[in-house]
Image (tube, coloured by chain):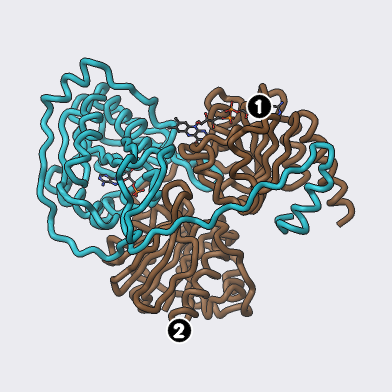
Chain colours: A brown, B cyan
Amino acid sequence: MVLVFAESQKGNFKKTAFEAVTYGYKTAQVLGTECVALALGTAHNAADLGLYGASKVLHVADAALDQFDSQVYAKVIAEASQQVGANVIVLSHTSTGKSIHGRLAARLSAGSVAGVNSIPTADGGFKVKKGVFSGKAIAEYEIKSEVKVLSVMGNSLQPAVVGSAAAVETLSIAVPASRVKVKSVSRIEGIVPLPEAELVVSAGRGMKGPENWGIVEDLANVLGATTACSRPVADVHWRPHHEHVGQTGIAIRPNLYIAIGISGAIQHLAGVNNSKTIVVINKDPEAPFFKAADYGVVGDLFEVVPKLTEAFKKFKAAE
Amino acid sequence: MKILVCVSKTPDTTTKIAFNASNTELDGNGVQYIMNPYDEWYALVRALELKEALGGTVTLINVGPADNDQVIRKGLAIGADDAVRIDMNPPSALNVAFQIAEHARAESYDLILLGKETIDYNGSEIGAMVAEYLDLPFVSYATKLDTSDGKTATIQRDIEGGVEEVEVDTPFVLSAAKGLAEQRIPNMKGIMMAKSKALKVLAPAAFEDKAVTVQYTLPPAKSAVKMIAPENMEELVKLLHEEAKVI
Ligand SMILES: Cc1cc2nc3c(=O)[nH]c(=O)nc-3n(C[C@H](O)[C@H](O)[C@H](O)COP(=O)(O)OP(=O)(O)OC[C@H]3O[C@@H](n4cnc5c(N)ncnc54)[C@H](O)[C@@H]3O)c2cc1C
Ligand SMILES: Nc1ncnc2c1ncn2[C@@H]1O[C@H](COP(=O)(O)O)[C@@H](O)[C@H]1O
């Protein structure tokens, strides 16, 4: 059986959870077994996980789980997986999922692969792939242990509705006390965080200064996109650090990445070259980013970006 | 404080990647290796700062073959006191974590620091594994770590779309993200001193690997970029909608 830990925030499931359930469902099909979802703490509409292929949803409702601690979560997930006899445990490759993933592998003596981006195969051993070396190669792993732990890279598959609402079963598991005290949590409200964003508008040093970012924000607003930036831009505080993408920042894989006034250094590409579609706007036709792009525009960003925003506006109005 | 910093070696992002004839291993010829930036710039430097403020020792650990000594020496040159290398070519993350935990268990460190991930495999799993093997709390993606007494620490960490502040008592395991410290460049004196610092080489403990790489492939070649005239942004929008189907 495949057990999927469906992450929620303030009781709401996020797209990454639906992706993980979709991944679990497809994996279960390969293995000829069923996919069961696990929800921890407050969970609204848990039955909806059935839409994405969970045959049932297990729920450990203890409110203590509304605060995250990797040790507590790993204990509860491990125990749930043992109670139901799961062979494969699927998590999201988010900061929450990543800090549980390794714990589960160690706790259950399970082989693990972190950040998988395709469905496993099972003829001749259990094998699964992920991108490595900054997207320059794909590595295939074989997991030999009885229990396997996988975390799914965000946006590596689209959640697909394949079923209907599932039965939610309460699971009673004693929740141990956490040794990490959460003092405060602050989230930027209203925008999709970069690792989950499907549309990203990103800009670099070509912008000349922070006062010029209005045109980038206008474009992002029209699209409903999240904004990002290159490292030097964050380093000189033109933009907040959490927008920095690349090797030393956040790695993302949105459906659309629009790069404005960014040269496309390899360390920048390392964090963005898994994007499905890349648009590059740069005045220098020799900018290395064009080699990694799907669509390129050679021109002055101060003229091109407002025009693109207008074109998107027209498109949205016509839709 | 008695601090352990886990350091790893990775190919520099800019090097070309090639594999052996059977595509089962990285071909190390001509590959330029560096210390994983998260380990070097953030985990190690914050450890040194804590030692400077509170006293104690900073020990490095690496699980790897003799080639890795160069990277370990760099860490000693930056300021670590001594180092341990578990002599093996680790086939899996769980094995690396197991070896680190076996060493740490006997030494009772107050703090075990790692980078948030390696930049080659981006697993981001070893910290959690070490914490689990040692039954210790784990705080990941730390951007700020403060402790005035070496016993209780206040930490800021990155979470999805935000920041969390937590408090935890030593001993615990922490993974370092950008912001935790400022990179230090080793100076001549550090490099000279590093030569005489102890680098202990230990045999690995027995461990059965559960997940191993079997094959590497290159990603499908990217099709050539389509250029669009700057005055024709409607065309770009149309292509994004009809051809790329991303809007
Ligand atoms: C170890 C290491 C790690 C790193 N990690 C990262 C990382 O995580 N992320 C990252 O981004 N970088 C990283 N870097 C830095 C990276 O190497 C580049 O220096 C950086 O990405 C360049 O940023 P940029 O493209 O914004 O600036 P530049 O390289 O200065 O490029 C600006 C671009 O804007 C264009 N431009 C200028 N004016 C206009 C205009 N009016 N209209 C249109 N185009 C214009 C120029 O042609 C140029 O291509 C790292 C470097 C190292 C050594
Ligand atoms: N072979 C190794 N030896 C010692 N520490 C390691 C090794 N590999 C990884 N680490 C540490 O674990 C962190 C996370 O690595 P990973 O989980 O592989 O992404 C790294 O930043 C290092 O601090």
Would you name the residue on which mark 1 appears? A206
Q: Position of residue A162 (x, y in %)?
A: 62, 77
Q: Position of residue B180 (x, y in %)?
A: 40, 32
> Which chain does the residue under circle 1 lie in?
A
Separation of residues labelled 1 and 2 (CA atoms)? 53 Å
Would you name the residue on which mark 2 appears? A32
Find numbered disc 2 in the image and state the secondary structure of the residue it sits on: loop
Q: Quadrant of the C terminus of chain A?
A: bottom right
> Which chain does the residue under circle 2 lie in?
A
Looking at the picture, tell me which residue is in the foreground, A3 or A137.
A137
Question: Is the residue A16 above or below the residue B69 in the image?
Answer: below
Looking at the picture, tell me which residue is in the foreground, B58 or A300.
A300
Residue A190, can we see it? no
Q: Are marks 1 and 2 in contact (CB under 8 Å)?
A: no
Question: Is the residue A113 above or below the residue B67 in the image?
Answer: below
At label 1, the amino acid type is: Gly
**Residue at disc 1, CB closer than 8 Å to ligand 1:** yes
Residue drawn at x 44%, y 34% as measured from the top left: B178
Residue drawn at x 30%, y 43% as measured from the top left: B29
Q: Quadrant of the rendered structure where residue A116 is?
A: bottom left
Q: Position of residue A64 (x, y in %)?
A: 43, 58
- Nearer the observer, disc 1 or disc 2? 1
At label 2, the amino acid type is: Gly
**Residue B99, label in figure:** none
Residue drawn at x 74%, y 55% as measured from the top left: B247
Residue A105, can we see it? yes
